Image (cartoon, helix red, strand yellow):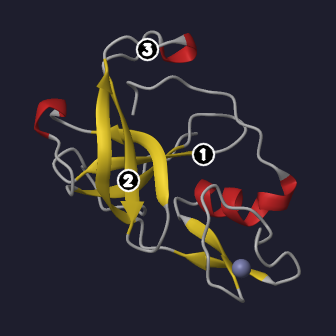
Amino acid sequence: MERFPIVEVTAEPELEPYWSAAREGRLVLARCSVCGATPWMPRPFCSTHPRAVVEWIETGGRATIYSWTTVMKGEGVFKDSSPYVLAVVELEDGPRILTNVVTGDDEHLCIGQPVSAVFDHRAAGGSILRFITDDARTGTPLAGAQHGN
Ligand SMILES: [Zn+2]
């Protein structure tokens, strides 16, 4: 996780259930009570059913790699983080998420490879969701996520 920069995060008040769970190392999604959609990023409304109730559901945090690339030359705050993995992962519980993958071996990643949600708690404003490969994980998914301060 130290490979990645400590970025500034603004936790939107309307997404407090998401940010609160993230601080505890849990991944939750907003699910529309009418159509069951679970968009990423979470939002407190459904774009198809704006009057529907949105419920916050806990996920298992398990996903598979849908697509990925290794960024060899990072930009901005990621300038000193390269090489690093930028990926789209498909959550078992729903959406695809653009994210970073923490891996022990960038060269042997593959599409369909299982990964688990992990949170980087170093930022002051909120915990950053990333995913980690099984071989790079030292603890259990989510509950074993790094806890800062
Ligand atoms: Zn809906």
Identify the amino acid type marked 2: Val
Q: Nearer the viewer, mark 3 or mark 1?
A: 3
Which residue does the numbered mark 2 point to in the structure image?
Answer: 89
Residue 16, quarter of picture:
bottom right
Which kind of residue does numbered mark 1 sit on? Ser
Q: Is residue 95 above or below residue 139?
A: below
Apparent side of residue 138 relative to residue 11 in the rendered image (left or right): left
State left or right for residue 107 relative to residue 75.
Answer: left
Q: Rate crowding at label 3 as few (under 14), some (14 to 19) or many (20 or more) other CA atoms within 10 Å.
A: some
Image coords of residue 19 (percent x, y): 69, 56
In the depicted structure, whether residue 98 falls above or below residue 77: below
Q: Residue furthest bottom?
A: 34
Find residue 141 and report its horizontal and vertical position in percent. Answer: 35, 61
Identified at 44% across, 26% down, the residue is 4
Camera sees residue 144: no
Task: Residue at 38%, 24% (x, y): give it.
Answer: 3
Label 1 or label 2, whichever lies nearer to me, is 2
Per the model, the C-alpha gap separating discs 2 and 3 is: 20 Å
Which residue was labeled with disc 1? 127
Q: Is residue 69 left or right of residue 42?
A: left
Earlier along the polypeptide chain: callout 3 or callout 1? 3
